[in-house]
Structure formats: structure tokens, C-alpha cells
């Protein structure tokens, strides 16, 4: 949530990236952050849909098991996708910093907001066993 708010503040203030390295390295990182935000929103929506599915099937249990397993598989797949995106986005930020990128204050907010919130979602996913093998 912090990434889009920081981008909106930068656009409203009319400030531009300071250096050429900033203008060259920030757009790919920003695209990664947008994908991460959409994946996180998709994971939260799928968890809510899965909980709704469980509640609905608690009333009538006919044919519930395949739907529950499919929902659990979707949630696990999105969690693994978020983990991969977190690792690659962190690697991209570290690589850009090594190349001389100096993020502005709104970019710092976006980096901390997106990587931090995704990290918290991954901790919650690990707590609920989304990365565990069920055998």
C-alpha cells in the first residue's frame, strides 16, 4: 500500500528522479513491486474465498473435498510465487544499489512498504504451513 501512495505523492509534488542512474534503474524495480502488490492482493482474496468455501461446505459436505484441495493448492501456489517475487525483487534492489542507484525518499518508502508487507505475508504463510510438505 505504501508504494502506490509514495508514487502519488511524487507525482503531485512534481519532483523528478535526480540522476540518470535513478531514471534507468527505478522503472524495472517499480514494475516488480507492482506485480508483488497484485500477487499479495490475489493471495489475500484467495484466502478469503477459501474461508468462504469452507464455511459454505460446512453446511453441505457433498463433493467438498476436491474443491477444498483445489483451493488449498491455489493458495500454496500464490504463496510460493510471492516468495519468488520477494527474493528476485530484493536481488534487483541490491543489484541496483551496487550500480550506484540512490533512491529518493518516496522510493525508500516504496521499497520498505512493498518488501516489508510482502515479508509479513510470507511469515504468516509460513506460520500456517503453506510452505510445508504434507507427507
Image (cartoon, rainbow, N blue to C red):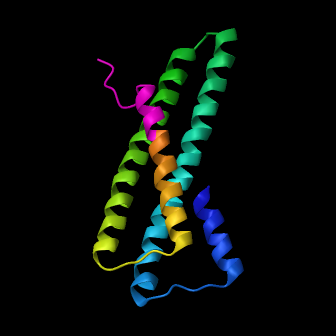
Residue 37 position by quadrant: bottom right
Q: In terms of depth relative to the viewer, which is nearer, 87 or 79? A: 87
- Tell me: residue 66, above or below residue 9: above
Q: In terms of depth relative to the viewer, which is nearer, 92 or 106? A: 106
**Quarter occupied by the C terminus:** top left
Tell me what residue is drawn at x 45 percent, y 63 percent.
32
Q: Is residue 126 left or right of residue 31?
A: left
- Tell me: residue 125, above or below residue 91: above
Tell me what residue is drawn at x 49 percent, y 58 percent.
112
Tell me what residue is drawn at x 62 percent, y 9 percent.
61
Magenta stretch, residue numbers: 122-135
Q: In terms of depth relative to the viewer, which is nearer, 75 or 109? A: 109
Please check the rendered image and state whether residue 65 is part of the magenta-colored stretch, yes or no: no
- Tell me: residue 126, above or below residue 119: above
**Quarter occupied by the N terminus:** bottom right
Q: In terms of depth relative to the viewer, which is nearer, 63 or 53? A: 53
How many numbered callouts? 0
User: Residue 101: image x %, image y %?
Assistant: 37, 78
User: Residue 5: image x %, image y %?
Assistant: 65, 64
**Residue lying at the far bottom of the rendered structure:** 20
User: Residue 17: image x %, image y %?
Assistant: 52, 84
- Tell me: residue 5, above or below residue 9: above
**Residue lying at the far front of the rendered structure:** 105
Please check the rendered image and state whether residue 123 is part of the magenta-colored stretch, yes or no: yes
User: Residue 57: image x %, image y %?
Assistant: 64, 15
Q: Is residue 99 left or right of residue 5?
A: left
Amino acid at each position: 500500500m505504501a508504494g502506490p501512495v509514495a508514487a502519488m505523492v511524487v507525482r503531485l509534488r512534481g519532483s523528478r528522479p535526480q540522476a540518470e542512474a535513478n531514471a534507468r534503474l527505478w522503472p524495472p524495480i517499480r514494475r516488480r513491486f507492482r506485480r508483488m502488490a497484485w500477487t499479495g492482493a490475489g493471495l489475500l482474496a484467495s484466502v478469503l474465498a477459501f474461508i468462504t468455501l469452507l464455511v459454505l461446505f460446512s453446511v453441505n459436505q457433498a463433493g467438498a473435498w476436491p474443491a477444498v484441495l483445489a483451493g488449498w493448492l491455489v493458495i500454496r501456489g500464490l504463496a510460493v510465487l510471492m516468495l519468488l517475487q520477494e527474493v528476485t525483487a530484493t536481488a534487483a534492489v541490491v543489484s541496483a544499489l551496487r550500480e550506484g542507484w540512490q533512491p529518493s525518499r518516496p522510493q525508500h518508502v516504496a521499497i520498505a512498504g512493498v518488501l516489508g508487507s510482502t515479508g509479513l505475508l510470507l511469515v504468516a504463510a509460513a506460520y500456517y504451513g503453506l510452505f510445508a510438505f504434507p507427507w
